[in-house]
Image: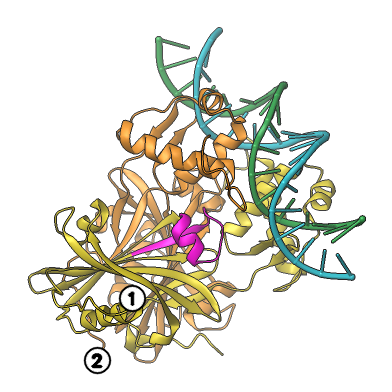
Chain colours: A yellow, B orange, C green, D cyan
Amino acid sequence: MGTTATESVPEPKYWQLRTVLVRTIEQEFHTGEVLPNERDLAARFGVARATLRQALDQLELEGRLVRRRGIGTLIAAPRMGVPVAEASARDTWRIVDCGTVPATAGVAAALGVEAGVEVHSVRRVRMMAGTAVGTETLYVPVEIMPHVPGFLAESSRARAMLKQFQALPIEGESRAVELGVAEEEQARLLERPPGIPVLVLTTRYAGEDGILAAAVSTYRADNCKLTFGEAGVEVRAAS
Amino acid sequence: MGTTATESVPEPKYWQLRTVLVRTIEQEFHTGEVLPNERDLAARFGVARATLRQALDQLELEGRLVRRRGIGTLIAAPRMGVPVAEASARDTWRIVDCGTVPATAGVAAALGVEAGVEVHSVRRVRMMAGTAVGTETLYVPVEIMPHVPGFLAESSRARAMLKQFQALPIEGESRAVELGVAEEEQARLLERPPGIPVLVLTTRYAGEDGILAAAVSTYRADNCKLTFGEAGVEVRAAS
DNA sequence: AAGTGGTCTAGACCACCGG
DNA sequence: CGGTGGTCTAGACCACTTG
């Protein structure tokens, strides 16, 4: 409603610039097209390159742009919808490794156990459209799954862990989503530099007597839109 | 900074700096404490202030720091868990305004109707611990709720709309979460400058014959962690 | 080799907060 | 007033991609 016309403090240049760029790319560019290079754009708008880059940073965070070193700045494709509900399709996941280690403080909190308790962990990468969109580490206390065979090759052991996990008497799940940045480990798995923004999804699997397992997933925030669909209510956005 | 000498591609300084700072603030600082000012920190680490700020930007995105103009940089409190399931507590919401307008392209897509169709909208701000943590705009096609009284004061009309919405025969909900930045409107409601990162939650309410309503919410990404099904056993087996 | 985005610097000025 | 973070500049060099 009446937005005050009086700006006691004029908006920063990079934000004005972003607004102009949003309009421009919505009206004059299509997915995959290349913007003029940063030096030209900065000159055209009469700002320093650093200021222009601040505006582009915003647009990249919104998923409107993709910047590729050595190539240029492109209009991004719409974000992929990544279903977070239980999925059967195992082939969209690639197992990375697994292990059995004492729980860190964070993991222990998610599992509702004491820090240091031994837990199994399986790390996977989620693939969509040929690219890595997310990582997941599943944690299950050894007490919950005591009979994981130890003599197998790592990939076989990981599969055994997942199979046992899927057989657990899970009664419910609770999830949380927050913003984070990819550290070295995740960044490598996502094939991106460290520091890229990610959506961090924490899932807790509850049984009758408490938490049976927990998973921490990171999804590329530039690429991905996490979807929580109730199976019956899926909407056909495709047309 | 004596780090590993041979990096095929040495990590950027700001990332190394972030790593150092993470360790420092985890070990030597508590919530609410104030870091040394940026100029001192930059000097201490032997980098330009802009580089130090790049590292602080990362930490702010992760919700570890809060920067206050004129005050300093503080260690942030842990993020608030914001339940996203249906809540009864209406008092945590503050109605802003409402209206009846043609659907924009985005809204139309969420509702599964054609752009331009008339829709009711109600805008609210979600308050937690005395601060605005999120905004929400609810959209319901006029066709679904044809009998909203038009002669009332705005606040009464908004309440009437919400009441009618809650009486709709909703059979299921599907949600999506993605990253965005707050534009002028949301930024004002959140009492923050434009451009702050937000988690954008899109909820679609489905009835038997299609989408009855949709809501677009934005939550401060620095502050908030969206939680789904906190109740522990809030299960909904798809059947 | 030429062109792109990514990083980094040194310095300046501004808006805000407190005493 | 002095101190803080926020913005902006002009320039430099690096890493990556393509021809």
Identified at 80% across, 52% down, the residue is A41
Spatial separation of the CA atoms under disc 2 and disc 1: 35 Å
Q: Residue furthest front?
A: A151
Mark 1 element type: helix
Mark drawn on residue B114? none
Task: Name the residue nearer the viewer: A105 or B7.
Answer: B7
| Residue labelled with disc 1 | A154
Which contiguous range is marked in magenta?
Answer: A182-201
The location of residue B133, given as percent across then percent down, is 37, 50
* Residue A199 horizontal side relative to residue A165, left or right: right
Q: Mark 2 points at which residue?
A: B239
Q: Does the magenta stretch include residue A193?
A: yes
Q: Is residue A152 left or right of residue A118?
A: right
Tell me which corner region of the image, top left, top right, bottom left or bottom right, holds residue A114: bottom left
Q: Which SS class for mark 2? A: loop
Q: In this view, does C10 lie above or below B209?
A: above
> Badge 1 sits on which subunit?
A
| Closer-to-camera residue (A138/A238) | A138
Chain designation of label 2: B
Whether residue A8 is visible to the viewer of this picture, yes or no, is no
Q: Are marks 2 and 1 in contact (CB under 8 Å)?
A: no
Instruction: Please tell me which residue lies in front, B46 or B177.
Output: B46
What is the quadrant of the C terminus of chain B in the image?
bottom left
Query: Residue at 42% across / 80% down in the picture?
Result: A93
Q: Position of residue A63 (x, y in %)?
A: 58, 64
Observer-side mark, 2 or 1, equals 1
At x 21%, y 64%, the residue is A119
Q: Where is residue A73 in the image (x, y as percent from the top left)?
A: 72, 62
Task: Report the side of A27 relative to B131 (left or right).
Answer: right
